[in-house]
Structures are given as C-alpha cells and as structure tokens.
Amino acid sequence: ASIESLKGALGGQSAGEEPEEKRRITALDVQKKESDIYNISGSEDDEQIDPLSHEYIGIVANYFSVGLMIGGSTSLLYPVLIVQAGATASLMTASYAVVMVFWSYKIVFGFLSDCFPIFGYKRKPYIVIGWLFCAGVLISLAKEGNDVHPRHLVIMLAMANMGYVWADVAADGFMVWVAHREPIEKRGKMQTLVYSCSKLGQIAINIIILFGFSGPQMNCPGFEPDPSVACTTNVQVTKRVDHEAYQRNPFGWCYEMCDKATFEWDMSVPEFALSICFTIAASIPLYLRLKEDKSKAEPRLEFIGKFWKQIKRRACWQIILYGMISHITFGVSNAAKMPANYVWLNLHTFQHQIMVIFEKFVFFIGLNLVRKYALNISWRKQVLYGSCLVLMFSSMYFIIIFDVWRNAWFYIFTDVSALFMYTLNFLASHAAMVEVAEPGYEAITYSMITTATNAVSPLSAVISYQLLAFFPTLNDQESIATDTPQVRRDFACLHFLVIVLNLSSLLSLPLLPRQKKETRELVAKGEKSTFWGAYAIGSAFTFLCYSTCVTFVTVRYHDVYGCMKILGGGGCSADESSATALLLVSAILLYCYGTNFYLSFWPILKGERRFSWEMFT
C-alpha cells in the first residue's frame, strides 16, 4: 500500500497533535523512498549477521546469563518465602516485584549506553560493567551466610538484578542492531533466538534449585540438623509443623525429615550465589570479543532532542500506551494462589520447581515454533487467541477452589499450558518494539518502550495484592487452610474478578499494529503528537514511582504496615476502611479504560471511523 493510501486507513489527527505540515517525519528526520520504508538499517548493503559467529556469540551468551539471574532470583522466592518462612500472599507478591523492579528503570541504562560511549564503545563496556557489578553483589550475598534474613535476601537479589539489567539493556541495543539487518520477512529470528537462550538459562538454574533446595532445611519448618541444638519454640514456626509429628515427639520433632522434603541434602544460599558467579566469570571473555564499531558521542541536548522527536511519533507512543494498558490489565493475578497451592495442594519445592522448569521449557518451545512458523502472522490474532486460551486454562482453577479435584499435577498441567499461550502475547508486544527503534538510538528507544511496559508489572502486582483488601480471609496461609465455605466463596470471587480484568486487556488490541509492515508504514506516515508523547512518558514514570514506593514499603516494613488494606492486608483495626485501596485500584483501571476508549473507540462514536471486528484481528 502506498503511503498516501495509509492516511485514511490509520485515522486523522488526534487531540494534542501538531499541524499536518510539522508532522511529516521519518527516522532521523530523513524522508525515505516509499520502497525503502521497510529497510531500517539505512543501507541496502548491510549484510545479515550470524549471531552464532565468534564475533557475536557474546550477545547470545549474555541472554543465557540473564536467564540464570531471572530464573534464580525469582524462583528462589517460593522455597524461601512461602515454604520456609510462611510468608503472606501480599509479601510474596511484593517481594517478586521488588526483585524485578530495576527492569522498570531500563531507560536510565539505555540513556547511558547510547549517550555516553566508553572509549568509543556503546555496548561492550556496559555489558562487562553490569555483569561485574552483579557478580560483586552475589559475592556479598554469599558472605552473608545461609541464615540471611528473607527480606535482606530480597533486597540483595534486587541489587544484583540491577547489574544484569544494566548489561541486558546494552545487549538489547546490540540485538536490535542485528535485527535491523534482517529482511522484513525474516525479522524476528534474532529476537526469538536471544529470548530462547534466556529461557534455557532459566531452565538450567531451576534444575539447580530443584535438586539443591528440595531438602529438609528448606522444606521442613524448624528443621535442625545439629542434635545438640534444641528445637525452636517460636510459635510462628511450630504452628506450621506437622501436628502428628509434633505430638509424637515434642522435644525431637525438629531432627526428623518431614514428608515435604524430597532429598536428604540441601544447597546453601552462598553456594547458589557462587554458582551463578562462576557462569558470569566464564562469559566475560565472550563479551570482550564482541565486534563493535567505535562511535562518537553526540552532544547531549541534541541527542535528547532527537530522541524526543522519536517519542512524539504516533508509532512510538501508541505502542508504549498499548504495552502499558494491556500489561496492567492482563498482568493482574490472583495473589492468593501461591499460598493456596501450598496449603491445599501441598505444592512443595520439588513440585514447584518441576512446574517452573516445564513452564520455561514450554516457553522455549513456543518461541522456536513462532521463530520457524509464525513470524508473519498477525500480532493481534496471536494476542487474541493466546489470551483466550490462557484464560480458559486459568478457569480450571475453580475445580481446585471448590475441591472437585485438588491435585498438584493437575494444577501444573493447567499452569504450563497457559504459559505456552502467554508466549504469543509476549512476542507480539516485543516484536513491535524492534520496528520503531531507529539506528543510533537502539538501546534507548527499545529500553524506553520496555521501561513503560515493565513499569506497570510492579503496578499489576500492587493491584493484585490490593485486591486482597476486599477478601481478608485470603491473605495468610492459616486462613486459607481453614477451607471454609466463606474462604472458597471469597477465593472464587477474587479469581473470577481477575479473569474479567485479564479479558478486558483485549479491548486495547486496536492500538497494536497487525504486523511488521504495518508498523513500518505507521512510522513512514510520520504522525507526531507532543501531547500524546508527553502523556505516555508521564504515565510510565508516574506508575513507576507509585509501584516502586508501595512494593518497597510492603517488603521493608511488612511487620509494621503489612496489615494495612492499602498494602493488601486484612486491616490493622476492625474499622479500617477499604476505600483508599478501592480508590487507587479504580483510578488505575479508569486510566486504562479511559485512554483506550479515547484512542480506539471515541473516533468511531464521532463518525471518523467505522467499527469492525477486524480491529481485533
């Protein structure tokens, strides 16, 4: 389709947009020929790059190490917090968000990478520096010993993640640079390759957790390997001990291995941290060998000005808003699920890690199937079908809620099947980012869009445990374990509410371009809007600040403020109101539905566009 024919198809000028004559831009403000709009690299002579060659294998190795850190830092939380410490649902959800919080600050590292080359290199030095910082934090964690406090462990893992996110952003810039040299019909192969390697890293580290943390010290509350040390009398621990074992041997119960332990041995936290450090150290030479041309740093203000011009493009801010709206609504989860799995299904560490390994393996298979067969299938169709199937499998949890069939392996099947469909949603939202990231701005543009989508991930977690304020019977393991009709009704209501919120994410599909060519045509059309560019950036940073503050307070001061309903607790007093939590959740959802309604459906009501079901496919 010609560029002129796209004017009507993509709609007219939106609120806050600049005059038509000022909106005609393309990448780097250079008018390209219509036949060249699909070539992003800017040169027809650019050859495709083999990412597995010795000059670029470091990029792939980087994503494998990223997978080790993501999988290691998040999967460790279940055995440490839920199984060993008996954490509440809100604390577990907030801890996960804190560990991953620096994913929401990728724009900072993207700015450093693109704007401040080190010795003329934008990528290699930052990859090396990020991994050295990560390794340093892990070594510090190892020095803490095996008795590190769970809350301190969460903070240390978050700091380690800051280092690898630093490296990951620079590698993202490298990845986008390579992807831009792929022909449009094959573009996406590099992206799916590196994410596949990340999943392989997650599988590897979860296998280590499976065999290392399925012993008695992690899975048997109060277990004491030293017979000379008396059993604990801490009520918070003893109330989680098997009642029959405690009655049978009230003074020696802590020396017996419980049924929840699979093996007789345990890996210590220091050993776990140092095993990841070894892999990081072994990969450093591959990063140093990466082939990268030197580049000069642009004047800072000029660089920021050009970057701002890119953010003002409709192609950019529309994808940012789609990412935030869809991730907020589809990312809301049932925060009571993890403690319920532990007390209802007896899902101990061994089974949980089996489930996680299957999830990552299925994700890996899904990525490679898309890489081979579905690179050019409509992203909207992928999201639509994937989301519906995810929610279908999620609905099977009602069978567990009402005790029709409570079986850990049944839950694992439904969860793994749902994740396969989630792969489609993940790829669709990330593939569009490559098409709008322009040469010279790969890291900062890609990281800006991922920052916006990642910033709302902690926000989805905040909504998830703030919803618990309306169902106080579901916040702690002891209450869920009573399994009363009231608990089941509350659980069913919460689960149904989450499914409805997830389903509503499909309303934002008209904001997502259908495929790579449509995205490049949207870029070539050249619409700009200062208002919507500022709106997208302002929204991302507002959500980022809010979710960061709430999650850190929930983890750091859980003993003091964890009972507050605004933090997902059951209330610190009998007369504490749920109004504040309701107001905050309502405001966030109003933002999502209001923004999407104005951009997608208001033009239809005004007669500027016609409604069609093809908007969603």
Image (cartoon, rainbow, N blue to C red):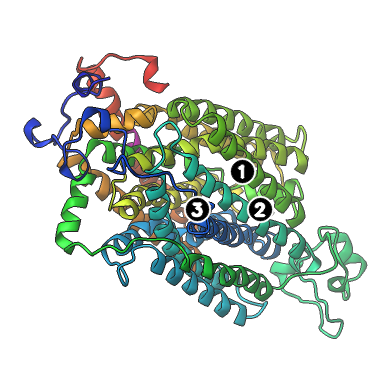
What amino acid does circle 2 point to?
Answer: Ile
Q: Tag 1, which secondary structure?
A: helix
Identify the residue at horizontal 56%, vertical 67% (top origin). Answer: 283
Query: What is the x, y in percent for residue 274?
Result: 63, 74
Q: Earlier in the sequence, mark 1 or mark 2?
A: 2
Pointer 1 residue: 364
Q: Residues within 10 Å of mark 2 (few under 14, many from 20)?
A: many
Question: What secondary structure do most residues of the magenta stretch adopt?
Answer: helix
Q: Earlier in the sequence, mark 1 or mark 3?
A: 1
CB within 8 Å, label 1 to label 2: yes
Q: Nearer the viewer, mark 1 or mark 3?
A: 1
* 554 horizontally vs 206: left or right: left
CB within 8 Å, label 2 to label 3: no
* Outermost residue to the right: 248
Query: From mark 2 to mark 3, how far is it between C-alphas?
Result: 32 Å
What amino acid does circle 3 point to?
Answer: Gly
Pointer 2 residue: 203
Quadrant in the rendering for residue 505: top left
Q: Residues within 10 Å of mark 3 (few under 14, many from 20)?
A: many
Query: What is the x, y in percent for residue 68?
Result: 59, 60
Identify the residue at horizontal 37%, vertical 50% (top origin). Answer: 177
Pointer 3 residue: 568
Asked if residue 559 shows in the view, the reply is no
Quadrant in the rendering for residue 21: top left
* Outermost residue to the bottom: 228
**Which span of residues is magenta-colored?**
590-594
Identify the residue at horizontal 48%, vertical 56% (top origin). Answer: 56
